[in-house]
Amino acid sequence: MQPANDSTPRRLRVAGVFSSGLFEYDSTWIYVSMETASEFAGNNHAASVMSVQVNDVDNVKQVSADVSKTLGNSYTIIAYPNGAGVSFATLTNTFTPTAGQAGLRVFNATGGATGLDVFVTASGAPLAAATITNALTGTASSFVSVPAGSEQIRVTTTGLTTVLLDLGSQTLSAGQNATLVIAPPAAGSTTLRAFLVPGC
């Protein structure tokens, strides 16, 4: 196994095999103990993402409130559609952007089978290297520092430069974090939606 943030391969013992039913996950994801994951990520035994699934969609607001109360204010909770139900993702808000820049992360709530790349550029600039790459459905990217000010944000399928969604010019504030939530198309549409949420 090779962690995404490290070029050193590591050996792990396979204790069991599971199937989520989604090829994208089954072919690339593993479950490990919190201790092992923390060692690989170097984050001192802290979870950076936690997902919660509810059985009754009518309880979404109450479960969200309960999770927020339990975890405190340094987390963002995202409720998103997952098949016939609603899932929750709890994201930590602990990131300090580089001085003079803004922090940005992406949460892919599309339910799509392919990853998404996000480009943050000057208005009208050509797409070169993606700012955030391969954001998979139901997951959040790590925060990255991006230029503060008015920046164009565009979303593509991972590895491609055909724009799926252009958010146009968005204002990113120096020293402040924002989460870009990419949502599935509205009923009757094929265009993805996105919400840039400042302060989290």
Image (tube, rainbow, N blue to C red):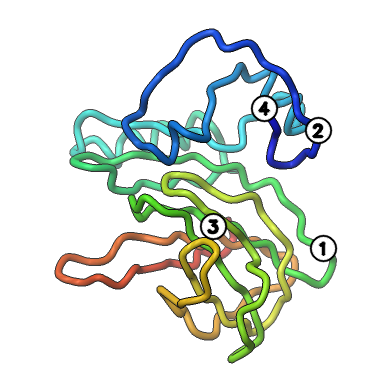
Q: Earlier in the sequence, mark 3 or mark 4?
A: 4
Give the left or right position of residue 179, taking residue 20 as reference.
right
Q: Label 2 to label 1, Cα distance in Å?
A: 27 Å
**197 up-or-down from 33: above or below:** below
Q: Amino acid at mark 2?
A: Thr
Picture disc at residue 1: 4
Q: Nearer the viewer, residue 158 or 144?
A: 158
Work out which quarter of the rendered image holds the N terminus and state it.
top right
Q: Residue at x 67, y 71 (%)?
A: 129
Q: Secondary structure at mark 1?
A: loop
Give the left or right position of residue 105, taking residue 70 as reference.
right
Q: Amino acid at mark 3?
A: Val
Q: Residue at x 15, y 70 (%)?
A: 188
Q: Earlier in the sequence, mark 3 or mark 1?
A: 1
- Residue 121 location, quadrant: bottom right
Q: Position of residue 12 (x, y in %)?
A: 67, 16
Quickly name the residue at label 2: 8
Q: Secondary structure at mark 3?
A: strand
Outermost residue on the bottom side: it is 124
